[in-house]
Image (cartoon, rainbow, N blue to C red):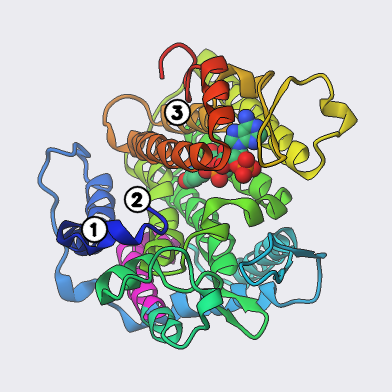
Amino acid sequence: ILPYGSSHSVSFPPVFAGVSCMMLFLPVAVLGLMVVCSQEDASLMSPPSLPALDSLLDPHVFGMVVLWFLFQALLYVLPVGKVVEGIPLKNGEWLKYRMNTLHAFVLTVAALGAAVHQGVDLGYIHSHFLQLAVSSLLFSVLLSVYLYVRSRWAPQDQLAPGGNSGSVIYDFFMGSELNPRIKGFDLKYFCELRPGLMGWLVINAAMTLAEMKLHNLNYPSPAMILVNCFHLFYVLDAYWHEEAVLGYMDTTHAGFGFMLVFGDLMWVPFTFSLQSYYLVYHPSHLSLPWIVGIVTLNVIGFSIFRKANSQKNAFRRNPSDPTLSHLKTIPTATGKSLLVSGLWGLVRHPNYLGDLIMALAWSLPCGFTHILPYFYVIYLTTLLVHREARDEAQCRRKYGSAWDDYCREVRYRIIPRVY
Ligand code: NDP
């Protein structure tokens, strides 16, 4: 939530205070949400019944988190999947990335299936949920310390545009090194897609089993099935289009520090799974028309999200792609053009619009008793509105008057006629 690389703004003391507060507040907020989620009254106003602090850190659970990370790392280095080049670095070099998230996913499912067959109880994840989150936090802190220390010796041309202010706290948070690697092992790329995203799905599966056990069900509830399927579909789509991540802001601009490490390893798996955790304790009964309505909403959101991202990616790869020849474009002084019709003529960020519609569809199966399952929509709206503003500032710098022409032509940012 901070600018990637504006050295003048970071000498301002409130920024350091803000970063310190975020580092304390965000993990506490995640744990607080998890505690409230499991209470009968999951209202954000109800006082959380806090667990004993010394029960939160369990060496055995920490070992499981480390094992999970190492297992995913092992899958990442398997010599399967194609190798592609990322976008060019400051020094003109291209880093190579192996695309094998789908292979890793299949092998993870097979390994978990075999483990369950051998008597491993996935219910452990549900019964140690808080401890797992605390261990992931500890692991994130340790990894961030390592990243900060090694960044002190990183060559200048491998530093990120931000995260090099000279303030230990700020640089620790933002991350100094752009693409920290151990031999060919890219720590940022690995963390962005694997332990956290895959962990999110495994947590969802564990919550499904916990729901069936707690309520003596032979099958998961329709609400739990919807939440699981939506999340699974979203992650598999990201894996199918793995290459696109190489062009995301996080990959191309952000240093790898506590902000991203915590986001990837604690925030994503433990807040994105709050809906399935909520459903374990708060059954939600859905009528058939309601189910059809929610599925339709998700399909609409996904179609907009996927079409917008695929169109832009295809256009950036090959501006004269014949399948896009019907779309209107605006030329810019950089030689690149901007799409200005179709979905990219509807709003300036149709991909964000689709993402937000899907986020709403993921929350609706949980009903309307509490706001907590809507946490993801609220968080994503805040994040994408802020991200849109940052991207807009960057595009205005890059494209100058052509960007202003684009904004005149496409007036709304994310929601047609609203925002
Ligand atoms: P985008 O994929 O939208 O990329 C923005 C860039 O696209 C701009 O900087 C510009 O770069 C290019 N662009 C903008 N407008 C046009 C246009 N009209 N024609 C052609 N190119 C254009 O942004 P993000 O990286 O933020 O998001 C990627 C995806 O990730 C989105 O779908 C988003 O919803 C999702 N996301 C999900 C999150 C979650 O937590 N679930 C978090 C963050 C993102 P250039 O011109 O240099 O190519």
Q: Quadrant of residue 70?
A: bottom right
Query: What is the secondary structure assignment of the residue under circle 1?
Result: helix
**Which residue does the image show at 73% across and 49% down from the upper left?**
240
- Mark 1–mark 3 Cα distance, whole angstroms, equals 26 Å
Magenta residue check for 340: no
Q: Give the range drawn in magenta.
A: 123-144
Q: In this view, does 339 lie above or below 410?
A: below
Mark 1 closeness class: few <14, some 14–19, many ≥20 residues within 10 Å: some
Q: Distance between the residues labelled 2 and 1?
A: 10 Å
What's the amino acid at mark 3? Leu
Whether residue 296 is visible, yes or no, is yes
Residue 14 location (% of width, % of height): 16, 57
User: Mark 2 or mark 1, which has the lower sequence index?
Assistant: 2
Whether residue 230 is visible, yes or no, is no
Residue tagged 2:
1
For the C terminus, the quadrant is top left
Tell me the residue that label 1 is attached to: 22
Across and down, in percent, residue 4 comes to 42, 56
Q: Nearer the viewer, mark 2 or mark 1?
A: 2
- For label 2, count other residues whose C-alpha is less than 10 Å away and answer few (under 14), some (14-19) or many (20+): few
Secondary structure under badge 2?
loop
Whichever of callouts 1 and 3 sits on the residue coming sooner in the sequence is 1
Q: Mark 3 points at which residue?
A: 360
- What amino acid type should be assigned to the residue bearing mark 2? Ile
Instruction: Specify which label sits upstream in the sequence, 2 or 3.
Output: 2
Please indicate whether residue 84 sits to the left or right of residue 27 in the image: right
Residue in the picture at 44% in, 39% down:
393
